[in-house]
Amino acid sequence: MILSLKIKLHPTKEQEQLMWQSAGVSRYIYNWGLALKKQKYEEENINLSISDLRKELTQFKKTSGFAWLNTPSADGGREALRDLGDAYKKFFKKQGGYPKFKKKGKCETSFYHDPRKLKVNDDYVYLEKIGLVKMSDEGRLPKGNYKKDKIKVTNPRIKHNGRYWILTLGIEVKDEPVELTNVSLGIDVGVKDLAVCSDGQVFKNINKLRTIKKLEKRLKRLQRQVSRKYEMNKQDNKFVKTKNNIKLERQIKLIHLRLRNIRNNHLHQATNKIVKTKPSRLVIEDLNISGMMKNRHLSKAVQQQKLYEFRRQLEYKTKKYGIELVLADRWYPSSKTCSSCGTIKSDLKLKDRVFKCNCCGLEMNRDYNASINLSKYNQ
Ligand SMILES: [Zn+2]
């Protein structure tokens, strides 16, 4: 299985400068290749292949005298041309439009790094021509000299996500056999709490946290400000982008990014904790998420909780551990059934937070009761 990693980098000012330059050169070479390919085709009806372009690039580096073309990691330019080749392939397979020139600020800021030239120790990663860059990592990246120790990673790229630099790469992990318990774990996924498990674990709805609420409020205020400013600066029915608006939009982007990170981290923490209890079986409701999205009140909560993403993470993490993931039929009455005696309480309402059984007298948190029922699904 290929695991994709994202690692936050903490470059110094000088290193960051080199990173911006490297990304700029990659973009330049991509555009240069695209322009040359177009020109050769239009003027001489010659279809340059990517290896032709690479030869041309070597020549161009010599004749142009642009020393800065060698700024990025040696393979950066070659890879920019490979990306161009991929863009053409997509176009010919009708999966994408004709390749376009990359504009600064409009396209992803990134550059490629030769995987064999990576070296990693505890907190630093060595990047060619940039040096030892400090990184945030919890030991996910294998340590060593990647060429000498024959550590294989795929497609390492250094990207700027609008706020900070990250290293992304793919890494082959062996599916290690994990000793599982014979527990069947039920998970009730919901709007009030993110997840309530039949073993008693509860994962909160992170959107009720004050930090999130504050960020959401700020976001709304900024969005209103932007649209007001657009209206104000409208000229002959055309919207004009002012410096101020660009600044506001940047702030909005950063808040979105922060919210996304907080939410994703929370989901990863929850799903990690769940699979690490090593149940042999995990049962969740086959949520009718698209149905919930139609409900105006629920849709925002579902969107914010990222229930799709929660399920996606459980899918690949259970696969990694060899845990069976069972989707309970959405008509299975997990909420309305008494987990103790099995009586179905048909008059249970959505607002009833406590399940009270009229038959055996059980009183239990509604979601916890549901998760126990899920754990017994088809058993
Ligand atoms: Zn009962």
Image: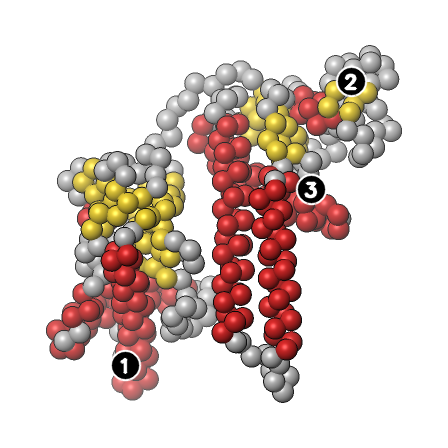
| Numbered badge on residue 324 | none
Q: Is residue 362 above or below residue 314?
A: above
> In the image, which is nearer the foreground, mark 2 or mark 3?
2
Q: Disc 1 marks which amino acid?
A: Lys
Q: Which residue is mark 2?
A: 363
* Residue at horizontal 28 percent and vertical 74 percent from the top: 32
* Mark sitting earlier along the chain (2/3): 3
Q: Secondary structure at mark 1?
A: helix
Instruction: Decide if residue 273 is on the left or right side of residue 9.
Output: right
Q: Secondary structure at mark 3?
A: loop
> In the image, which is nearer the foreground, mark 2 or mark 1?
2
The reply to whether the C-beta atoms of the residues labelled 2 and 1 are less than 8 Å apart is no
**Which picture quadrant has residue 24?**
bottom left
Q: Disc 2 marks which amino acid?
A: Glu
| Label 2 packing within 10 angstroms: few (<14), some (14-19), many (20+) | some
Q: CA distance from mark 3 to mark 1?
A: 53 Å
* Residue at horizontal 37 percent and vertical 62 percent from the top: 109
Q: Which residue is mark 1?
A: 40
* Residue at horizontal 54 percent and vertical 54 percent from the top: 256
| Label 1 packing within 10 angstroms: few (<14), some (14-19), many (20+) | few
Q: Which residue is mark 3?
A: 288
